[in-house]
């Protein structure tokens, strides 16, 4: 595990070098008959969380029609002229709104070539929904989908609480989306088509650079045929940034309408590092077989209420509030970007760094 941040030239070479792939099983877990099977499901989830940190859930109750509808809404949003999307710009303070080519990852020091629109349930969205004239029905459909994603998340939260010996509703209460100050985020993502080789400048078109999420748990919806998600397990503590170099492609079962889920740093910390928050990325396409076309995905980040009290059963880390946890994660992330940029001798112009203030580093 490398804990150093390599310089830009090394990173470019790494990004262009053939990727080392290893086969790893990403478990598929059915939520069918949830109430009567909760113990069986809990043990499957705990096993997945302790080992890979990633799993797919099926029989989760969100229909493929509902998933298709939100992807249609996402395309409708991103098809708006920039002047319209620009009316709801990303606000780092609120962690909501639209950004384009603006998120820098500590792992790459470069922007992701994408646009995203982050939505929330509560006051964080005040002034950040497009008005109904621009996109009739959008807000309502988006919120309907977000409540469905929340109810799947709550099932998973109940199991993880049970697995850690907390009361079943322990995490659900700490992630109450009916509160106006709820921090939970649904992020619509749109990666642009990437130019194919030959690539004379050697420029790397990062899609989502390697990162970990810093929420409790992320649900990721992808469109069939628009692959690119890769994972790299092996991280030991929720406070480290190092990642290895053997990746595994995650191809969820589209027929079964599988949702890819991953543990975030919050749950890793809250479980005293027992459940693994795993490095993942949407690879910068550069090798034969990579997908260069545009990609739509939707990430649902379960974020804690600001006053949630966070400490694992073994008290490995000091007790912090939800607000402090998020602030610490952002500060660590920001510092990692600054350290990385400082190291680069060939920075020609100052880079304005916007910390990656969504639920991922
Ligand atoms: O778009 C994807 O598939 C992954 C997105 C992601 O990992 C993130 O936004 O945290
Ligand atoms: Fe992520």
Image (cartoon, rainbow, N blue to C red):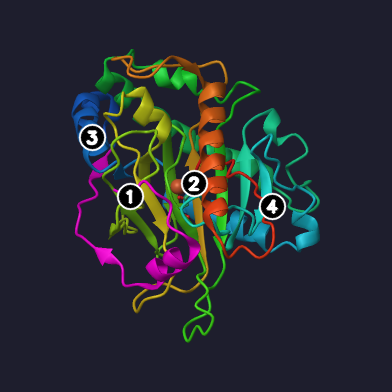
Q: Is residue 48 left or right of residue 303?
A: left
Residue matched to label 2 = 299
Report whether the residue tagged 2 is closer than 8 Å to ligand 1.
yes
- Examine the structure image and report whether residue 14 is included in the region drawn in magenta: yes
| Membership of 2 in magenta stretch | yes
Of tags 2 and 1, which is closer to the observer?
1
Closer to viewer: mark 4 or mark 2: 4
Tag 2's secondary structure?
strand
In the image, what residue occupies the spot 68% across and 50% down?
98
The earlier-in-sequence mark between 3 and 4 is 3
Magenta segment boundaries in residue numbering = 1-30
In this view, 330 is above or below 234: above
Which residue: 19% across, 59% down?
23
Between disc 4 and disc 2, whose residue precedes?
2
Crowd band around label 2 with a 10 angstrom C-alpha radius: few (<14), some (14–19), many (20+):
many
Q: Earlier in the sequence, mark 2 or mark 3?
A: 3
Pointer 4: residues within 10 angstroms few (<14), some, or many (20+)? few
As measured in the structure, the alpha-carbon distance from the residue carrying label 2 to the one carrying label 1 is: 27 Å
Q: Mark 3: few, some, or many residues within 10 Å (few <14, many ≥20)?
A: some
Earlier-in-chain disc, 2 versus 1: 1
Q: Secondary structure at mark 4?
A: loop
Q: Which residue is mark 3?
A: 50
Q: Are marks 4 and 1 in contact (CB under 8 Å)?
A: no
Residue under numbered circle 4:
352
Image coordinates of residue 141 in percent, x first then y, are 61, 44
Give the residue number, with chain letter if any, for mark 1. Answer: 2
């Amino acid at each position: 595990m490398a804990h150093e941040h390599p310089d830009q030239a090394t990173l470019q070479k790494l990004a262009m070098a053939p990727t080392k792939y290893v086969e790893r099983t990403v478990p598929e877990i059915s939520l069918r008959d949830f109430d009567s099977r909760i113990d069986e499901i809990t043990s499957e989830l705990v096993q997945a969380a302790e080992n890979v940190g990633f799993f797919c859930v099926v029989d989760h109750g969100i229909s493929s029609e509902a998933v298709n509808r939100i992807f249609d809404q996402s395309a409708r949003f991103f098809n708006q002229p920039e002047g319209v999307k620009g009316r709801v710009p990303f606000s780092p303070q609120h962690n909501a709104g639209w950004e384009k080519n603006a998120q820098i990852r500590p792992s790459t020091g470069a922007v992701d070539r994408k646009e995203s629109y982050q939505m929330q349930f509560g006051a964080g969205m005040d002034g950040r929904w497009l008005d109904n004239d621009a996109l009739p029905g959008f807000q309502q459909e988006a919120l309907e989908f977000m409540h469905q994603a929340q109810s799947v998340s709550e099932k998973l939260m109940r199991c993880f609480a049970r697995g850690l010996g907390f009361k079943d509703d322990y995490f659900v209460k700490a992630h109450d989306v009916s509160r106006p100050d709820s921090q939970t985020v649904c992020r619509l993502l749109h990666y642009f088509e990437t130019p194919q080789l030959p690539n004379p400048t050697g420029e790397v078109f990062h899609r989502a650079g390697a990162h970990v999420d810093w929420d409790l748990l992320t649900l990721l919806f992808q469109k069939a045929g628009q692959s690119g998600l890769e994972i790299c397990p092996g991280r030991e503590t929720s406070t480290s940034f190092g990642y290895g170099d053997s990746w595994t492609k995650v191809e969820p079962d589209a027929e079964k309408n599988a949702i890819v889920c991953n543990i975030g740093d919050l749950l890793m910390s809250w479980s005293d590092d027992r459940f693994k928050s795993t490095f993942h990325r949407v690879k910068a396409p550069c090798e034969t077989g990579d997908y260069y076309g545009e990609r739509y995905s939707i990430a649902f980040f379960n974020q804690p209420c600001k006053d949630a009290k966070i400490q694992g059963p073994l008290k490995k880390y000091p007790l912090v509030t939800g607000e402090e946890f998020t602030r610490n994660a952002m500060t660590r992330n920001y510092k990692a970007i600054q350290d990385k940029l400082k190291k680069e001798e060939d920075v020609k112009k100052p880079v304005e760094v916007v910390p990656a203030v969504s639920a991922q580093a």
